[in-house]
């Protein structure tokens, strides 16, 4: 069992525990998942998305056959095997409702764009709307599911806003966009 907890030292000398990025050795990768910030419970357990909302995220990926956990205890342990990666735009952990500020998103943008350039993901799945909006011009609007008008900002990678539980995305739309994600993934992999 892997544990992805690391310690980061800030320029001012302060340290904090967070989760390291989980990425294959090289790209291109099929999906890069981009979260907002690691939840404190996730950092404590050493695995991504361990809170209630996070558990729903993993379960939905499993339900729609996008990520199979297989013999692993945690879904994030199966990411690299499936040619996926995961990161957060802001690495300093916090609990739900304690949102990052604009400065933190701006600081995280450079790192995220470098990862996208390095790994050439075919699909970028944003777990939450704020990180997606932080990486595109303010006039662009995003919706749950694929946002082809935003692909140009990410080297042509298909951009997808995940219909996370607790968001204003109804079940019908959630089903539709998750099926589209599954179908697109299969086409990319040459399974259809």
Image (cartoon, rainbow, N blue to C red):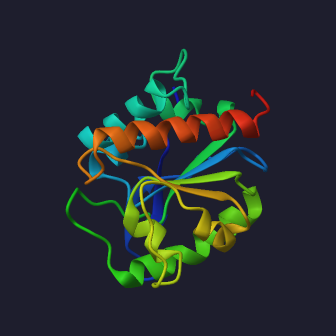
Residue at left offset 30%, top offset 38%:
171
Residue at left offset 59%, top offset 69%:
150
Outermost residue toward the top in this view: 71
Q: Position of residue 82 (x, y in %)?
A: 66, 32
Residue at left offset 51%, top offset 35%:
179
Toward the viewer: 123 or 78?
123
Whether residue 143 is situated above or below residue 113 in the rendered picture: above
Whether residue 3 is situated above or below residue 146 in the rendered picture: above
Do we see residue 149 in this rendering?
yes
Residue 119 position by quadrant: bottom right
Q: Position of residue 95 (x, y in %)?
A: 23, 57
Drawn side of residue 17 relative to residue 1, left or right: left
Toward the viewer: 24 or 34?
34
Toward the viewer: 104 or 19?
104
Q: Position of residue 37 (x, y in %)?
A: 38, 60
Residue at left offset 37%, top offset 54%:
38
Indicate the quadrant containing the C terminus: top left, top right, bottom left or bottom right. top right
Outermost residue toward the left in this view: 97
Whether residue 161 is situated above or below residue 45 in the rendered picture: below
């Amino acid at each position: 069992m892997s544990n992805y907890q690391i310690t980061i030292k800030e320029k001012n000398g302060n340290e904090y525990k967070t989760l390291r990025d989980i990425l294959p050795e090289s790209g291109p990768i099929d999906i890069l998942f981009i979260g907002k910030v690691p939840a404190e419970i996730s950092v404590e357990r050493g695995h991504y998305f361990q809170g209630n909302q996070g558990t729903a995220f993993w379960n939905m990926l499993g339900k729609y056959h996008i990520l199979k956990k297989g013999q692993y205890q945690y879904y994030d342990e199966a990411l690299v095997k499936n040619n996926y990666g995961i990161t957060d735009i802001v690495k300093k952990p916090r609990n739900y409702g304690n949102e990052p500020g604009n400065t933190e998103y701006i600081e995280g943008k450079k790192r995220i764009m470098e990862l996208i350039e390095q790994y050439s993901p075919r699909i970028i799945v944003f777990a939450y709307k704020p990180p997606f909006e932080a990486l595109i011009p303010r006039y662009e609007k995003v919706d749950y599911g694929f946002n082809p008008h935003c692909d140009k900002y990410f080297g042509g990678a298909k951009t997808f806003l995940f219909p996370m539980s607790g968001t204003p995305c109804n079940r019908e739309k959630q089903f539709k966009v998750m099926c589209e994600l599954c179908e697109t993934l299969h086409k990319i992999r040459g399974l259809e």
